[in-house]
Image (cartoon, coloured by chain):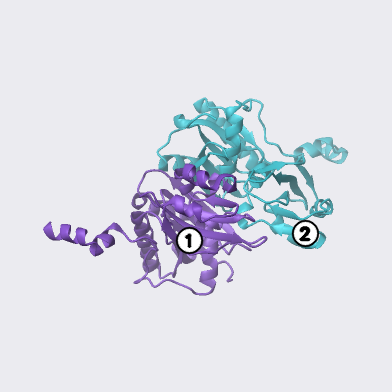
Chain colours: A purple, B cyan
Amino acid sequence: MKDDDLILSFDTATNNCSIAITNGDFGQGQVLGSLSLNSGVTHSKRLLTAVKWLMQNLELALADIAAVAVGLGPGSFTGLRIGMATAKGLCHGSSKPLVGISSLDAIAAGVYSEKLICVVMDARKKEVYSCFYRCNPGKIARRCSQPVVLPPQELAEQISEPVIMAGDGIDVYNAVLADVLGDRLETATPLHRFPEATNIGFLAATEHADENYLDLDQAKPDYVRSSDAQLSLVSPIAKGKARNQ
Amino acid sequence: MKDDDLILSFDTATNNCSIAITNGDFGQGQVLGSLSLNSGVTHSKRLLTAVKWLMQNLELALADIAAVAVGLGPGSFTGLRIGMATAKGLCHGSSKPLVGISSLDAIAAGVYSEKLICVVMDARKKEVYSCFYRCNPGKIARRCSQPVVLPPQELAEQISEPVIMAGDGIDVYNAVLADVLGDRLETATPLHRFPEATNIGFLAATEHADENYLDLDQAKPDYVRSSDAQLSLVSPIAKGKARNQ
């Protein structure tokens, strides 16, 4: 870990716009500043304004930042594209490297439990994005599965042990999840509903130390599910429709 | 719990200025927005500006807020006075009730562990403010001692079981604490160094539901330790000095 390597991080995978400036990792790190705004306003309207406000109030310029880190998703396709486009813009403009961190990991990293941890993000269309995690004693949550998109009931049926769930999907699908899991279901506090930029910053510190950067020309969000536009390209019905238009 | 009772909360007990707008408690609550700024700038310069910025970005006015909640300390005397004065000003101006929450509790509430939880805030003068907490399974930390101010070594010597420590005192006194506690000492992640306004908001929701408000004329911070000014009033040497001035 380099000394004094400030990371500007943000996540726009959900309605919540989360921004942070951190230094270091979960072991020795420090939060210099953070903000989150959860309202109906589109991320394109407020993300850069909020980044600018935060940096000004910390008396920092982009030149003081060592790397930019962005939440890769999954989540809202539009939100993710705005986040990635903004991150690329900032990096191109300032010649800073870009780190990508899963938005699921950015939720899980804030939860500490000896139980199985399951992140559940609302994916619309009666589905959730989900991934499983476990904590070693005194350590942050680490993935023990791959991210998937599936109906919440199908997810719950895969779980045979006590579980703590985090992410905004637990508010949307609480009844379905509680119905299958019963007493085995514990819900994380409301502090663990959305991907937190502070967690992205701390996770990104390791990637930055390893110089594990994204290619600015090639980098794209991790949608986990194909977009409607992509789906219609491979669907004969959609193709037919497109042809007739 | 009333529906849609927004609480504006902030804490200025440490160098970190933390502000949040929340709705509800730890069970069913929601963070509408939050921000934290940890820099050398005095709270008097930025607290109100930051509150205003946050509310504007959430398209909220003071009229939309049900109550104001302030971190009572312990911590920096000047910081606490600025926080309390600002909270009283906002409440007087808008006829909103004021809730007070311990800044120690606002650190502990974010930590979940089956171990004993100990909050340690730097109190300068080679002392720490401290208080012990325990979590029932799936519940937030609750106090199991009264707040005290004492040398960190004396604190560590009182602890005979595995403990997780949170608060900025663990960075300042890590060597002393680790020396006495050895393997029994676990350090919470850097997310739990400062009193978080989101926690104050969630804790204040219960006080608000019970209409457990502070008297705007009488309310003062909980300093835990007497101020230098107060100490010199009762010290014969200081009295003599004052007399000779």
Query: Where on the picture, by quarter, is residue A93?
Result: bottom left
Q: Seen in the image, is A91 located left or right of residue A179?
A: left
Amino acid at circle 2: Arg
> What is the chain identity of the residue bearing mark 1?
A
**Is B207 located above or below residue B237 in the figure?**
above
Tag 2–tag 1 contact (CB < 8 Å)? no
Asked if residue A211 shows in the view, the reply is yes
- Where's residue B42, x and y in %? 58, 47
Q: Which of the 4 image quadrants contains residue A112?
A: bottom right
Q: Which residue is mark 2?
A: B184
Q: Quadrant of the N terminus of chain B?
A: top right
Q: CA distance from mark 2 to mark 1?
A: 34 Å
Q: Is residue A238 left or right of residue B215?
A: left
Above or below, A130 against B17 in this view is below
Mark 1 = which residue?
A: A8
Q: Is residue A116 above or below residue A213?
A: above
**Other-residue count near label 1 (Cα within 10 Å), few / some / many at <14 / 14–19 / ≥20:** many
The residue at the point 49 percent across, 30 percent down is B3
Secondary structure category for the residue under label 1: strand
Q: Residue furthest left?
A: A244
- Which residue does the image show at 35% across and 71% down from the upper left? A218
Q: Position of residue A9 (x, y in %)?
A: 47, 60
Point out the image quarter for the C terminus of chain B: top right
Q: Please check whether the numbered discs 2 and 1 fall on a single chain.
A: no
* Amino acid type, callout 1: Leu
Where residue A197 appears, as percent x and y from the top left, is 49, 56
Element on which disc 2 rests: helix
